[in-house]
Amino acid sequence: MAESKRTGIARRFYGKADGRSRVSMNRLKILVTIVNRAKADFYMDHIQSFGVNMQMVVFGHGTAPREIATAMGLADSERAVVFSVIGENHLRAALDSLAEKFNTIAGGKGIAYTIPMSSIIGKSIFNFLSDNRDAVRRNEK
Amino acid sequence: MSGFNHEVILCIVNNGFSETVMEAAKDAGARGGTILNARGTANKEAESFFHIAIQPEKEIVMILVDAKIKDAVLHALYQKAGLDTMGQGIAFSIPVENVVGLTPWKTEPKEGDKAAEKKAD
């Protein structure tokens, strides 16, 4: 019974009769942030404050020529690429804040961009990734 | 800022070929990239059948470019680091939105404009 109730909620909010779900509310995006490795933890903590529940960091190194790298304030070439799953509702605030941090923090220059996510499977995972705490509370009742 | 004006090109090559990739990409107009170390997997049975050794150590070169030069960069990568070369590279692009932090890249065309103006003078 609980199962059918849950499915009902899913259909009402995210489902379509043709079997292909369309999410019209709060689409998810992958926010990719490339920063100096020393600043990775700082930026990850900062991004987390925008309703981001899952982040992944990959370490790499940059290839920008020395002159450009220095101009960008990136003295060493060790980089961190942070992948964060973020809801569209938080995106604007996160990007504005990141842009401001890139310009103001010494050695904190970086690049950020988003990749739209087209599909995701699993309602609880969607709720987790979009920080949809109300939906979880509703299901628990 | 929004809209698909930029593309991120991902090029997966054998270890040690990221410089080849970057050189090719820069010739086609790209500015910089990020190299990630990765490990590739291949079908072991197919590998022995075709007598091809797949080097598992890979490098992924991530290059953020203007959508206008994406095709040129991809063509350059295909020719200089494609599957027929030692780099055995695979390249593809993903459209991205909301790019922030690219300001230093925009200064260079302005300098070019200034140079063009000087020439005009």
Image (cartoon, coloured by chain):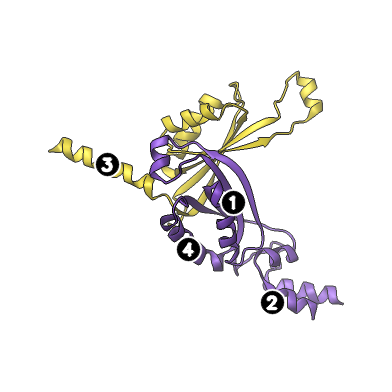
Chain colours: A purple, B yellow
Residue at image mark 3: B111
Most extreme residue toward the left is B121
| Discs 1 and 2 lie in a common subunit | yes
Q: Residue at x 56, y 47 (%)?
A: A37
Which is nearer the eye, A9 or A98?
A98
| Discs 4 and 2 lie in a common subunit | yes
Say what secondary structure mark 4 lies in: helix
Q: Position of residue B14 (x, y in %)?
A: 63, 28
Q: Chain of mark 1?
A: A
Cα–Cα span, label 1 and label 2: 27 Å
Which is nearer the eye, B115 or A120?
B115
Q: Chain of mark 4?
A: A
**Amino acid type, residue under disc 3 in the picture:** Glu
Residue at image mark 4: A97
Q: Residue at x 51, y 24 (%)?
A: B80
Say what secondary structure mark 1 lies in: strand
Residue at image mark 2: A134
> Which numbered circle lies on residue A82?
1
Cα–Cα span, label 3 and label 4: 29 Å
Which is nearer the eye, A38 or A69?
A38
**Amino acid type, residue under disc 4 in the picture:** Ser
Q: Position of residue B6 (x, y in %)?
A: 46, 48
